[in-house]
Image (cartoon, rainbow, N blue to C red):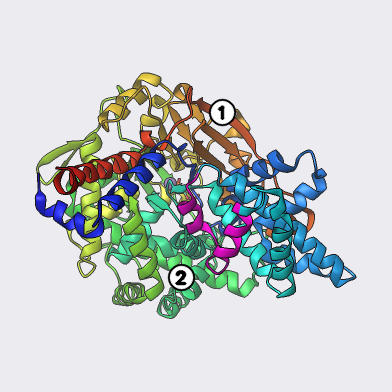
Amino acid sequence: MNTKYLDLLAEKYDSEEKVVTEIINLESILDLPKGTEHFVSDLHGEYQAFQHVLRNGSGKVREKINDIFKDTLSEEDINDFAALVYYPEDKLKLIKHQFNSKQALDEWYAEKIHHMIHLISYASSKYTRSKLRKALPEQFVYIIEELLYKTDEYTNKKPYYEKIVQKIISLGQAEKLIIGLSYTTQRLVVDHLHVVGDIYDRGPEPDKIMETLIGYHSIDIQWGNHDVLWIGAYAGSKVCLANIIRICARYDNLDIIEDAYGINLRPLLNLAEKYYGDNPAFRPKKHSDQNITDQEKLQITKIHQAIAMIQFKLESPIIKRRSFFNMEERLVLEKTDYEKQEITVYGKTYPLENTCFSTIDPSDPAKLLPEEEEVIDKLLLSVQQSEKLKRHMNFLMKKGSLYLKYNGNLLIHGCIPVDENGNMEQMEIEGKAYKGRELLDKFESYLRHAFAHKELTDDLATDMVWYLWTGEYSSLFGKRAMTTFERYFISDKVSHKEEKNPYYYLRENVEMCRKMLEEFELDPSQGHIINGHTPVKEIDGENPIKANGKMIVIDGGFSKAYQSTTGIAGYTLLYNSFGMQLVAHQHFNSKEDVVLNGADVLSVRRVVDKELERKKVRETNIGAKLQEEIEMLNQLMAYRYIN
Ligand SMILES: O=P(O)(O)OC[C@H]1O[C@](O)(COP(=O)(O)O)[C@@H](O)[C@@H]1O
Ligand SMILES: [Mn+2]
C-alpha cells in the first residue's frame, strides 16, 4: 500500500471520528436513489427553446408541482405557479401590477414562498442535506434551512415559521427569495446534464447556450460535427473557419461572428463587394422572426459566395496532401468544366447554374487570389484573438469528448462507422489501421493535438479536424460525402443526396447494438446507445426508440430549420432511478407566451426502460468513485487508527 498517499489523506482526516463520519456519509450516499440525468442534443443555437427545456427539466418541474398540488390548486393556478418557477424574474414583473393593495401582494408572496418551500422539500427528498445546501441561494441558506427543517417537526413551530416569512416580506426580500428558490428547484430536478452534440450552427444564439452551459452545475458534452467545426476554426483550420462563416451567412447569422464573438468581417465584405453580385443560390435562408432589408440581404448573399468559394479552394490542397482521406471525388473545382459550365461527379455530368467563379483561374482553379488569402488569414487571426470564443472553445474541450461511457450507456453524437455487414470500418492513418473504439480515440487525440497547437494550420492533426466534419469514416459525419457544392450549383436533387453510413439502418438491430456496446466494453444487456445528429422524422412515423430500446435517437429538431421534417420541436431524455423516459417537445413559441398564458407546451412521455428495482447511486459512475474513496478511508482507518 502506498503509505505516502495515506499520510496525505490523514492530513485531511486527522482524527478517527472524522474518518468514521466520512465513511458513514459516503456509505449513506451510496444507498440514495441515483440522481436524474438529462440528455439533450442538436441544440443548434436555439437558446430560447433550450432554456425552456432546462428550466422546466423536460417536464419534471411541472410533474413535481402536480404531485403536490393537484388536489389543492386549480389547473390554472398550477400553470401559473409553474411559469413562476421557470421564469421567476419575468413572472414577478408581470404579476406585481395585478394587485391593488400591498397587503394582497404580500399575501401572494407568502403563499408562493410557502409553496416553493414545500416543492423544494419534495424535490430534494432523495438528496443529502449537504447536496441540497449547495443548491440553495447563498444569501438565504440559513433562512431556507430554518423553513425547510423546522416546519413540520412540531406543530408549535408554526408561528415561528410564519414569522420568518413575514419578516422576509417586510424587509423587502420576498422577490429575491422567490427567484432563488425557483432556481434551486430547477437545479434539484436535474442532477446532471449531457449535451449529445451540435450546440453550434443554424440557429441564432449558440454563444448564449455556451454561457448557460458554463454556468451549469454538472455537465458533459459529446461533440457534434458542428461543434468540431468551430473547434477546428479556433484551432487553426482555415477550411473549418470558412465553413462556419459560410453557414452563418447561409442562415443569416453573421451577428454571431461579428457581434457575439467580435470577429471583424470588413475585409471579407470588401472582397465580396468586389467580386460578387446577387445570386439566388446564396441568398440567406428566411427567418420568420427576422426582417432584413434588401440591401442587407444582398450584402449577405455576396459574403456567402465569397466565403463559399474560399472554402472550396481550401479543400483542394488538403484532399491532395491527405490521399488516405480518400476524397478525390470532392475535388470539385478541378472537376468543373468552366467553358461548358458543367461538372462530372460520381460518373455523372450535370449542368451548373448560379455559378460565381469570378475569382477562379481555370488552369489552377483551387489557387486563392492574394486578396482571398489575406482575408482568410485576417479572419483566422481575429478568431484566435477573440477572448469570448477562446473561453467557449476551452470549455468545449474541457467538458467534451467524442463519446462518453456513463452509467453503462454509450453517448455519441453521430455513429460508429461500419460496413454493410456490420463490421467496424477500418481507416489507415500514418501507416496504421484503426477501427471502432480505437479509431474514435485516435480521432480525439488528433483533435486535442490540433487544439494544443493553434499556430499550426496545415499539419495532419488540423486536417483531421476537418476530416471529422466531412470525412467518410468520421464518427461525427456518418455519411459518404458532403454535397455542399452540388447543392449550390446543381438543380438535379439526385446529386444532393448524402449517402448515410450503414450504421444508420443497422442500428435498428438489437444484435448490432449489443456488438457496439461490447466494442466499448459496456454491458450489452444493460447499456443503451444514445445518439443525436439525424433528425427523427416522427411525422413519417419514425420511432426514436430503436432496437428494442437499446438505441435511442434524441435529435428531434430543436433547430427550427428541421422542424418541418421532424414534426416536433425536439426530444430530450431523462434517466432517473426509475428508468428512462423520452420526452417529445411540441413547438416552443416564446418565453413571453409561457409567462403570460402559462402555456407550457406539454411533452409526451414514453417509458424506454423501467428499472425493476430503483437504481441507487451505488450502481453509477459516481457510486464507483465513492466506493473507491470509502476503500481508501478504510485503509486509512486500519493504517492509522486501529491497532
Ligand atoms: O441544411 P443545410 O444547411 O443545407 O446543411 C446540410 C449539411 O448539414 C449536414 O447535414 C450536417 O449537419 P447536421 O449534423 O445537422 O446533420 C451535412 O451532412 C449537410 O451537407
Ligand atoms: Mn450533427
Locate residue 144: give its quadrant: bottom right
Question: Element type at marker 1?
Answer: strand
Return the disc, 2 or 1, that comes first in the chain's sequence: 2
For the residue carrying disc 2, how many other residues have a C-alpha within 10 Å: few (<14), some (14-19), or many (20+)? Answer: some
Which label sits in the foreground, 2 or 1? 1
- In the picture, measured across the screen, residue 565 lies left or right of residue 525, that is right
Where residue 249 appears, x then y in whole percent? 50, 64
Point out the residue furthest to the right here: 100
Rendering coords of residue 90 (x, y %): 70, 65
Q: Is 596 positioned to the left or the right of 153 in the image?
A: right
Q: Which amino acid does label 1 sit on?
A: Val
Corner quadrant of residue 374: bottom left
Q: Residue under circle 2? A: 257
Residue 153 sits above or below residue 500 on the image: below
Q: Nearer the viewer, residue 497 or 508?
A: 508
Name which quarter of the figure residue 29 lies in: top left
Report the magenta stretch's main SS: helix
Question: Which range is magenta?
Answer: 127-149
- Tag 2's secondary structure? helix
